[in-house]
Amino acid sequence: MCSHVYVKKESGEETGTTQKTALNSAGELIVQNNEKLTLFIVLFCHPCYCQSRTASTRKPQDQIPIDSCLFSITYTYHYAKDTIGKVRLFDKQVLEIGTTIVHYYSKNAALIDSIMFQAKVAVNPRKSFAANERELYEDIYWNYPHKDSIGVYTGLVNVDYFYEEPVPSMEWKLTEDTCSILGYTCFRASTRFRGRSYTVWFTPEIPISHGPWKFNELPGLILKARDEADLFVWDVQTILREQNKKIYVMNPRFNKIIETTRPNLLRLQEKRWKDPAGLHVQHGSAMHVRDNKTGKFMKMTPGQLVLPYIPVPELE
């Protein structure tokens, strides 16, 4: 779905592809050419554009079972839409603990894929979502495809990028500070990881050395986590013991998956705000904005649009 930007013309007529847009200090997009156009963003993007994924391109019917699921832990993940305003979006995410494999993914993304697959007519898969509720297309697997590594699938535009890396090491500073979460006694710990400082609360009462996202290596399940700037916050909601449930992975035969590296993926994610039109063109897609006066859509060209900085958990 295209990005919707309403256009207010201050003088002259629209000149098309020579425009250059950027964000000013007031949070307005300015089109720079021989005329001045002020673009007021009403909706930056499709709800899933924060992870830049077209949901209907995933095929849930072609998933492959790779392990049995023993526990399912659900979290609410709140994150900053950008660093200009104070808008916080959220996603419902799941941590599945298997006999050897651990899987962390978006429950909302899985729901949308299922709805889109089963739909016989056009539907709005986000009809049941709350305001500011979104889906992030990122799946993290521990000990898959190889032991002592993590495999990460990240959706961008119309493909999933995949990279594998060794299990990341985290050096934790433990404290005696405690709190109670869901009736469990939790201890506070902190770490510096890939450019950001994080504080978490874990419970030794559940001896699982995992948590949301890539957090690991603590003597108990992590129930809450946040970065020092409050751009990213994870809060546990439920902890369930599972029976007859499987952990699945996408079948590469039926889904478009491109192997990459983590540094290259970070560069691609940076283009979501530095050059979103260029990112779409790179993937054989396009981005449009709408002129509020004419009602017509204008196709954005690479390098023409700059959005506010979209933060990511890993800076390096």
Image (cartoon, grey):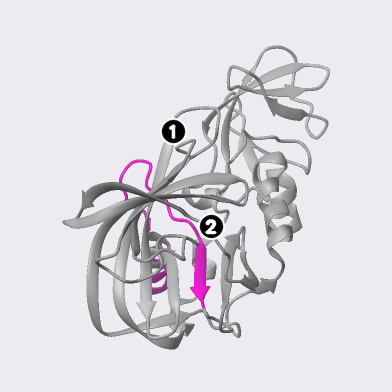
**What type of secondary structure mainly makes up the magenta span?**
loop
The magenta segment: 113-142
Asked whether 139 or 293 is in front, the reply is 139
Asked whether 68 or 177 is in front, the reply is 177
Please say if the residues under marks 2 and 1 sit with CB atoms less than 8 Å apart. no
| Quarter assignment of residue 74 | bottom left
Instruction: Inspect this view and state whether residue 284 appears.
Output: no
Asked whether 83 or 59 is in front, the reply is 83
Give the residue drawn at x 44%, y 33%.
87
Does the magenta portion include 136? Answer: yes
Any mark on residue 53, and which?
Answer: none
**Secondary structure of the residue carrying numbered label 1:** loop
Any mark on residue 171, and which?
Answer: 2
**Position above or below: 113 against 47:** below
Task: Give the amino acid type for the residue marked by disc 2 in the picture.
Answer: Glu
Taking the image as shown, residue 19 lies to the left or right of residue 186, namely: right
| Quarter assignment of residue 86 | top left
Residue 60, percent from left and from top: 44, 77
Give the residue drawn at x 47%, y 60%.
215
| Quarter assignment of residue 157 | bottom right
- In the rendered image, the residue lying farthest to the left is 183
First reached walking from the N terminus: tag 2 or tag 1: 1
Task: Give the amino acid type for the residue marked by disc 1 in the picture.
Answer: Val
Q: Residues within 10 Å of mark 1 (few under 14, many from 20)?
A: few
Any mark on residue 87, and which?
Answer: 1
Asked whether 82 or 228 is in front, the reply is 228
